[in-house]
């Protein structure tokens, strides 16, 4: 009886969601080539993990009239937004060791934009996003029911990966490929389901906001960027984004968004003004995006 329940559940789920799963799978395979192609671009420096903010920020400030924003993307390419020495507004890839401009970020190709939109929403906006999220959840249920069937077939979880008795061609390869692809499918379905829950605010998305007490900001002792303790102890590999002060006034400060927290730093003394850890939901969302898209290093 138990076997029948799992078998019919597995079959009904597969039949009911076959088309959406096929479309999501095909577009997902296509999109998998984008992060791979981006990683081949020559904008990452060899010693990236060893470079600290105390080393790179002074160099960058010498090569730009003004910097408003520095971003480290998922390929560990450093992107600077600001004004160059010619007075032009620029958004460029830079070498964090020398400040040299390496290239200009390009927009996502129209083809990948089209595939991304279709993969996320089937061109049906929020309704499409709901169906795609539901498809991810159904595939997760199919995977779970498939695991149960294999355990029943192999007569125990300890024999999950033992040799399969070959009864017919399709059944044999269905079970074999299912076992081989089990982990990737679980990762894709769990992360996809989680991202959908965040999208529809079933899992609340918390945003960190730093409240700086402007009256308590000190203007001395004045230090060089190279002497800021927080900059010396923070590597570029830990950084997502740095927002630079708008002016040289003491009330303006650095906002540094790291992998797990957000800091505000006094631009004159180097003191940490505020420090806020990201909540677990934010970290799980980033992890899910990394796993689902393959964008992580």
Image (tube, grey):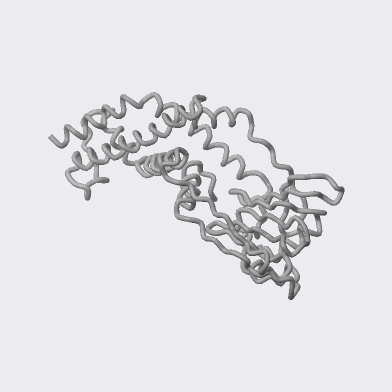
For the N terminus, the quadrant is top left
Q: Is residue 247 visible?
A: yes
Q: Position of residue 209 (x, y in %)?
A: 57, 55
Using residue 104 as the reference point, say whether residue 289 is left or right of it.
Answer: left
Using residue 218 as the reference point, say whether residue 262 is left or right of it.
Answer: left
Which one is nearer the viewer's eye here, 71 or 151? 71
Which residue is farthest bottom? 221
Q: Identify the residue shown where x is 60% and y is 39%.
A: 37
Q: Position of residue 74 (x, y in %)?
A: 58, 48
Compared with 221, 150 (above or below) is above
Q: Identify the residue shown where x is 72% and y is 50%.
A: 80
Compared with 258, 160 (above or below) is above
Residue 89, image quadrant:
top right
Q: Position of residue 251 (x, y in %)?
A: 72, 62
Q: Position of residue 10 (x, y in %)?
A: 26, 32
Q: Is residue 238 visible?
A: no
The count of marks equals 0
Which one is nearer the viewer's eye here, 248 or 146? 248
Which residue is farthest front? 215
Which residue is farthest right? 86
Q: Identify the residue shown where x is 74% and y is 68%.
A: 268
Which one is nearer the viewer's eye here, 7 or 222? 222
Q: Identify the residue shown where x is 26% and y is 28%.
A: 11
Which one is nearer the viewer's eye here, 132 or 7? 132
């Amino acid at each position: 009886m138990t076997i029948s329940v799992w078998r019919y559940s597995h079959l009904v789920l597969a039949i009911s969601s076959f088309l959406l799963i096929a479309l999501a799978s095909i577009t997902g395979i296509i999109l998998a080539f984008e992060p791979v192609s981006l990683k081949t671009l020559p904008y990452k420096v060899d010693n990236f993990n060893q470079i600290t903010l105390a080393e790179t920020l002074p160099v960058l400030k010498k090569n730009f009239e003004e910097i408003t924003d520095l971003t480290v993307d998922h390929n560990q390419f450093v992107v600077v937004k600001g004004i160059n020495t010619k007075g032009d507004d620029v958004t460029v890839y830079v070498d964090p060791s020398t400040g040299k401009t390496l290239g200009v970020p390009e927009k996502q190709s129209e083809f990948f934009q089209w595939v991304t939109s279709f993969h996320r929403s089937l061109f049906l906006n929020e309704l499409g996003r709901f169906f795609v999220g539901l498809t991810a959840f159904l595939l997760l249920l199919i995977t779970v029911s498939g695991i149960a069937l294999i355990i029943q077939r192999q007569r125990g979880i300890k024999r999950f990966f033992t040799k399969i008795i070959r009864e017919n061609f399709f059944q044999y390869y269905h079970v074999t490929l299912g076992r081989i692809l089990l982990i990737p499918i679980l990762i894709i379905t769990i992360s996809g389901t989680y991202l959908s829950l965040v999208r529809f605010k079933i899992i609340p998305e918390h945003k960190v906001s730093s409240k700086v007490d402007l009256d308590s900001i000190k203007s001395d002792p004045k230090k060089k960027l190279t002497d800021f303790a927080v900059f010396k102890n923070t590597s570029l590999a830990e950084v997502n984004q740095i927002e630079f002060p708008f002016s040289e006034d003491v009330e303006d400060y650095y906002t540094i968004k790291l992998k797990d927290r957000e800091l505000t730093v006094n631009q004159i003394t180097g003191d940490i003004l505020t420090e806020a850890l990201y909540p677990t939901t934010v970290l799980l969302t980033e992890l899910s995006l990394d796993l689902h898209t393959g964008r992580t290093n």
